[in-house]
Image (cartoon, helix red, strand yellow):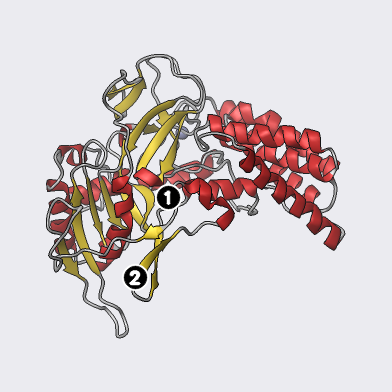
Amino acid sequence: MATRRSLSLHSFIQLLLSFSLAECTVIPGKQWCAVSVPAIFQPYTGSGSGICPPAVDDQSADWSPWAHKPYCVTTAPRRAGDQAKKFCAYTNSRHGSRGLSLVTTPEAAADSTVILDEYMPPYDVGEEKPFKVVEVPNKGLGVVATRHISRYEEIMVDYASLAVEITFASLVPAKTGYRVLHLAVDQLADPESILGLGKSNDLAADEIENVLRTNAFHTILGGMPHMALYPVVSRINHACKPNAYTRFIPRTLSVSVGASRDIKPGEEITISYVTVGQTTAERHKALKHWGFECQCDLCTSSEQEIAASDARRREIDDLRGQAAAAYQEGKPYQALRLTRQVLGLIPSEELFPLYSEQYENIARIYWILGDWETGLKYARQSLDVLREQGYLEDVRPEHLEVMVTNFRQSVGTAGRSGKGKGKMAGGGGGGGSSSQKAV
Ligand SMILES: [Zn+2]
């Protein structure tokens, strides 16, 4: 499905939320960790900026904060002009509750040490967990609720146990690569937390490769894409109309799982492995990567129900596109009517990630119509939804100020061009998903 997203405030906040760790920029004499988000949002990222720790590899005399001497391999350049690339296995035994192993470059490992300094609230001690991992009929293991879980309640926080740089598999010869992966897993306190995960990939020649291909989430670490394993989150099965969502927390290399609606005791907790809001054919095509035929409630409902759901999803997508177009063409009342229609259709398909975006769009329209009071009301509502969903810790006056500044710029754009009053958020292309499994 084509996406027509504009960089509105909503997108900015999403960018901020999915923002990865600080990236190192080399400045003569030292490396400076610069936060690569717009300056206006940097105060909210929580990571600030600072001096990057030095890169550590198997030649270093001191390899702290890693528990073992890094084990490194260097790739042979395949073509003239190719740079040799070094990958090492790093393990920190304190991260999260199981420790963390990385298979990555010395530079990405150095960047990622900031996550090791963060306070990590233990997720598996204290209050009784609202879920348990059990055998689920026809699905192997799954996660079910042990009590009522309210909408937007945080169900769990799970820390990555293993993260592997995405080019590692293609650049390192298989046999060497498997040796490094096994060392990285063996150095963890509980290797079984990785080795015991589901393995459903027929192409994998090694069990850790199979586990990665079956369970890994796409994660940014040190500015580079990585495949990461979150052992408990990996037990959550897929559903096309899931009752939970995942949110990546780069600061601690963890994933938070929240309830997208009320969940009954005994009900299975599900997330979507693909972008939510797609039609049946689109979802099944995307799910092929996991090699299973979806047997979720939506996919096993009657033909009429599946057709009705597909029609609603197409309509939501069309309406979002039409609303964005009407807004661009200087027809705010039409854009408002279409956006309200989208808002009305969201509950039928439980596409809760779309709420904040619609409220922001309505706020923007009222703002350019000169009704600032109503505009502010909807702007607050948009931010409140992000707070409820766990994306913002709280709603502060400066968040609202950022939003209003963005609206003012939209009005300014309208004055210059005569039409096209800035851009609305979204504008079609599926419901969006906060975190997707890696493919
Ligand atoms: Zn399904």
Residue 423 locus on image (x, y percent): 72, 52
Q: Is residue 284 left or right of residue 185?
A: right
Instruction: Name the residue nearer the viewer: 155 or 252.
Output: 252
Identified by mark 2, the residue type is Lys
Instruction: Name the residue nearer the viewer: 117 or 203.
Output: 117
Q: Is mark 1 within 8 Å of ligand 1?
A: no
Q: Is residue 179 above or below residue 230?
A: below
Q: Is mark 2 within 8 Å of ligand 1?
A: no
Q: Is residue 397 left or right of residue 341?
A: left
Who comes first in sequence, dot 2 or dot 1?
2
Residue at image coords 35%, 43%? 252
Residue 87 locus on image (x, y percent): 23, 64
Indicate the secondary structure of the residue bearing disc 2: strand
Identified by mark 1, the residue type is Ser
For disc 2, the neighbor class at 10 Å (few under 14, some 14 to 19, many from 20) is: few
The numbered dot on residue 100 is: none
Q: Is residue 202 above or below residue 128?
A: below
| Residue position for label 1 | 47
Residue at image coords 57%, 46%? 13
- Which image quarter: residue 129? top left
Residue 281 locus on image (x, y percent): 52, 42
Q: Is residue 357 above or below residue 58?
A: above
- Which image quarter: residue 82? bottom left
Q: Is residue 409 visible?
A: yes
The numbered dot on residue 30 is: 2
Residue at image coords 38%, 14%? 147
Q: Is residue 313 visible?
A: no
Instruction: Report, in whole angstroms, how far the alpha carbon at label 2 lies from the one at label 1.
Output: 19 Å
Indicate the secondary structure of the residue bearing disc 1: loop
Residue 437 locus on image (x, y percent): 39, 45
